[in-house]
Amino acid sequence: MTHEEKRIFLIRSLLSEQPGYRSLKIPSDERKQKDLLRSLMNVRMPSPLSDKYIETESEYLKEETRRKGVTHISDLTPVSDGIYLWRGDITTLDCDAIVNAANSALLGCFQPLHGCIDNCIHTYAGLRLRNACAEIMEKQGHEEETGQAKITPAFNLPCRYVIHTVGPIVNGRLTETDEKQLASCYRSCLDLAEKNGCKSVAFCCISTGVFAFPQRRAAEIAIKTVKDRISADNGKIEVIFNVFKTEDYEIYRELLG
C-alpha cells in the first residue's frame, strides 16, 4: 500500500467499528483525511485491534513522524550538566522517555483534534497506547492520583517510553499543596525513568495549560526538582525541558541561565 492507501485503510477500519459512521464519506482532500483519521482515533474507546490494523497504523504513523523530522538528543546542546532546553514537537523527539501531561483517567484526550499534548502523544503513538493505559487503570481500579506517574511503551513514537503524570489543577490562588504536587510529578517521573533504565527523559510543561499553573512558578519548581535529583544521582540521567510556546522558552532560558 502507498502512504495514502494506508491512511484510507485506517479510516475505513475505524469507520467500520461504528454503525453510525459507516456511511460517512471519506474526503478527497489530504488534510481533511488526516483530520478525520485523527478524530476517529481520538474518540475510540479502548478495545482490541487487529494485527493488520496495528501493522498498517505503525507503518503510517512512523512515516508521518519521519516526514515531520525526528530530533535526536545527540543533536541538542546542553545548557548545563545533564540539562537541555528544546523548543519543538515532543512527539518527534528521540530519547529514552517523554513525559505526558495526562488527566486522572490516564486514557488520553477524547476531544477530536484537541491541541493538548495528551492528544498529540496518543495520536502519534497510536491506539495501542490507549489500550495499554486502560489495562494499567483497570488493574489499579481507581483514577490516577495527582503527582503520581505511570509508564508505558511509546509504540510508534521515536522514544522508548511515555511516562504519564497527572499535574495539579489550580483553581484560583496557587497553594502550597499545588506546588508540592507539581514537584511530586517530576520526582515520580524521574523515579520511573530510572527504574526502567532510562538515561534521558524529556519533560513537557506540566500543568501550565488548561490546568492553569502559573508558568514561571511551574518552571522554577521543575528546574529545582530536576537539578536536585541530578545532583543527588551524580548525573545518571539527562533531562530535556521541552517547551512549545515562546513565552515558556524565554522563562526557561532565563532561569537556566
Image (spheres, grey):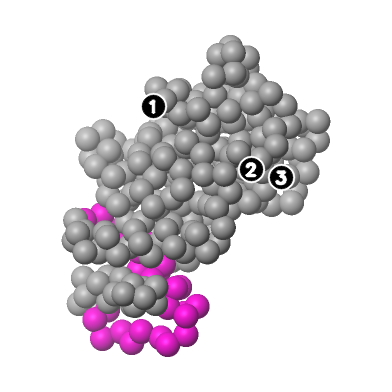
Q: Position of residue 73 (x, y in %)?
A: 59, 39
Q: Secondary structure at mark 1?
A: loop
Vertical position of residue 123 compared to residue 18: above or below: above
Q: Position of residue 56 (x, y in %)?
A: 30, 65
Q: State yes or no: residue 144 in magenta.
A: no
Residue tagged 3: 248
**Crowding near pointer 2: few (<14 within 10 Å), some, many (20+)?**
few
Residue depicted at 80% across the width and 35% down the height: 254
Residue depicted at 68% across the width and 23% down the height: 81
Task: Please say if the residues under marks 2 and 3 sit with CB atoms less than 8 Å apart.
Answer: no
Residue 235 found in image quarter? top right
Q: State yes or no: residue 45 in magenta.
A: yes
* CA gap, disc 2 and disc 3: 21 Å
- Which quadrant holds the C terminus? top right
- Which quadrant holds the N terminus? bottom left
Residue 104 shows up from this direction = no
Task: Please say if the residues under marks 2 and 1 sit with CB atoms less than 8 Å apart.
Answer: no
* CA gap, disc 3 and disc 1: 29 Å
Q: Nearer the viewer, mark 3 or mark 1?
A: 1
Vertical position of residue 247 compared to residue 234: above or below: below
Residue depicted at 66% across the width and 29% down the height: 83
Mark 3 or mark 1, which has the lower sequence index? 1
The stretch in magenta equals 21-47
- The numbered disc on residue 73 is none
Residue tagged 2: 75
Residue 79 shows up from this direction = yes
Q: Nearer the viewer, mark 2 or mark 3?
A: 2
Residue tagged 1: 196
Q: Is residue 47 left or right of residue 83?
A: left
